[in-house]
Image: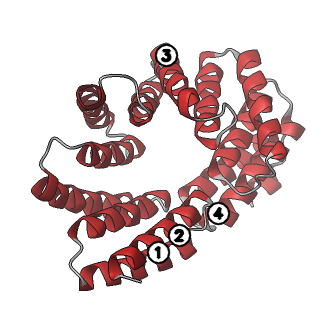
Amino acid sequence: LSSDIHSQILLSIARVHIKSWKISEASRYLERALDIAQQDEQSLRILDIKREMGMILFYQAKYTEALDLLKRSLAGAIGTLGDDHPWVVSVLLDIAFIYEQQWSLNEALRLGKEALVSQKRFFKTNTYHMAKSYDLIGSVYSKQGNYQDAIKSFDKSLGILKKYRHKKHMDCLKIYVKIASAYLKLGDLQKAIDLIQSCIKTFEAKNIKDDPVLSRTYLLLGTACFYTRKFYDCIISYTKSWAINTRVFGPKHPSVANDYQVIGRALTVQGRYREASE
């Protein structure tokens, strides 16, 4: 087994673990892959591995470290591939998603639109790669309170994804959840609830239990219940979100802290002050 094939296999296994949200296992395989790639100076493989390492830091909410690693990977990629290459654009999008999480929305939107222009030049027609750009742009619009444009952008992303994935694929579910969130913020509760419940049924049919997209879905359902003053159901949904995030990310992740906050808010509204303070 050549070192090149060995490092590729380890990288592929790591990516499977990442998709399953087994972050610790993924990190171990990436470290082994990087060690082999560095020994043989596999420059492109090293960049690929470091990109995945950067995204793991992103999932762990270590945004500054993730941004630093991805920027260094980007500089290496530009030096090797040039600045007009699809892989370089993909890393730019990864960086844009970190900016979006950090609420550096103007910078995130700028990078997202630049990536989309480059992708249209590379691929001519709508391809799978463009779905990520529309997803990013929609996410920024949503945080800016521009929910109608966010939904339009998410719809474009979903339309592209459906050409390559079944409508119940995880990539599509993630966009459905974001659309539901936008409808919820617009005050269109029924549309939001219908989408949320449809997504939960799909997760149940797939027997998916520990996935951040599912936790986000329960968080949205809890918020919809809160708005309709169904506080018992609200707390159940928020608690399910908390349980998933704790299992996937650990107790100190910002998502877990947010779950505690919304559970506390729901308890306070019910007058359950002692439980809320705990």
Residue at the far right in the pictured view: 232
Which residue carries the number 4 mark? 248
Counting from the top left corner in percent of width and height, residue 191 is at 72, 17
Look at the picture and state if 177 lies above or below 191.
below
* Residue 223 - label: none
Quick one: quadrant of the N terminus? bottom left
* Residue type at the position of mark 4: Val
- Identify the mark nearer the N-term, 4 or 2: 2
Q: Closer to the observer: label 1 or label 3?
A: 1
Few, some or many C-alpha atoms within 10 Å of disc 2 (few <14, some 14-19, many ≥20)? some
Horizontal and vertical percent for residue 47? Answer: 27, 64
Element under disc 2: helix
Give the left or right position of residue 87, taking residue 55 as reference: left
Q: Is 48 or 111 nearer to us in this picture?
A: 48
- Pointer 3: what residue? 152
Residue nearest the observer in this picture, 203 or 241: 203
Marker disc for residue 10: 1
Q: Residue at x 33, y 42 (%)?
A: 93
Secondary structure, mark 3, is helix
Position of 77 with respect to 169 (left or right) is left
